[in-house]
């Protein structure tokens, strides 16, 4: 069995609107799929079920909330809820308390790393001898 060198841990940290208990993502005018989304006069996109789409009117809000710079060339955002599973866990962490957010995100990363069961490779006696000679040579320089 071959192991992948990639571990995916998805974390969404939505900031709540002051005192309203809502996510600012709720203020974006989303259209829920299945539907079609307009990308200006250029094209239409098929929005599958389980995904949401916002056109030009919501792009700026989305880009600001995700802390991405907008170039005014964006025509829409297609947002699909990730399918959480054992191979790709998904965490939604409230951003109202910074220290708590950092603890939860850190714990998720540590848990993902621990699940890899990493260990140093076993080195045979011949290789250890070779490494010792190389070390001796480097220290002599």
Image: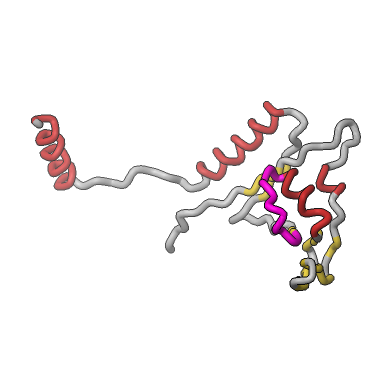
Per the rendered image, the range of residues in magenta is 66-76
**Residue 24 lies in what quarter of the image?**
top right
Magenta: main secondary structure = loop
Does 49 appear above or below 120? Answer: below
Picture coordinates of residue 137, whole percent (x, y): 10, 36
Picture coordinates of residue 65, whole percent (x, y): 74, 43
Q: Nearer the viewer, residue 1 or 136?
A: 136
The residue lying at 20 percent from left, 47 percent from top is: 124
Q: Is residue 46 magenta?
A: no
User: Which sits in the foreground, 89 or 66?
Assistant: 66
**Quarter holding the C terminus?**
top left
- Using the image as rendered, state which of residue 103 and residue 128 is in the foreground: 103
Q: Report the residue at 72% width, 39% height from top.
A: 93
The answer to which quarter of the image holds residue 107 is: top right
User: Residue visible at 77% across and 72% down?
Assistant: 44
Q: Quadrant of residue 108?
A: top right
């Amino acid at each position: 069995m071959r192991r992948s060198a990639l571990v995916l841990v998805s974390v969404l940290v939505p900031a709540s609107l002051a005192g309203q208990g809502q996510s600012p993502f709720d203020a974006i005018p989303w259209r829920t799929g299945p539907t079609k989304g307009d990308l200006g006069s250029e094209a239409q996109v098929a929005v599958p079920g389980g995904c949401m789409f916002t056109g030009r009117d919501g792009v700026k809000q989305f880009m600001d909330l995700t802390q991405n710079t907008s170039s005014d060339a964006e025509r829409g955002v297609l947002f699909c809820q990730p399918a959480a599973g054992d191979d790709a866990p998904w965490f939604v962490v409230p951003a109202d308390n910074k220290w708590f957010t950092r603890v939860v995100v850190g714990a998720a990363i540590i848990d993902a790393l621990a699940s890899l069961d990493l260990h140093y490779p076993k080195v045979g006696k011949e290789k250890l001898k070779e490494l010792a000679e190389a070390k001796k040579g480097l220290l002599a320089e």
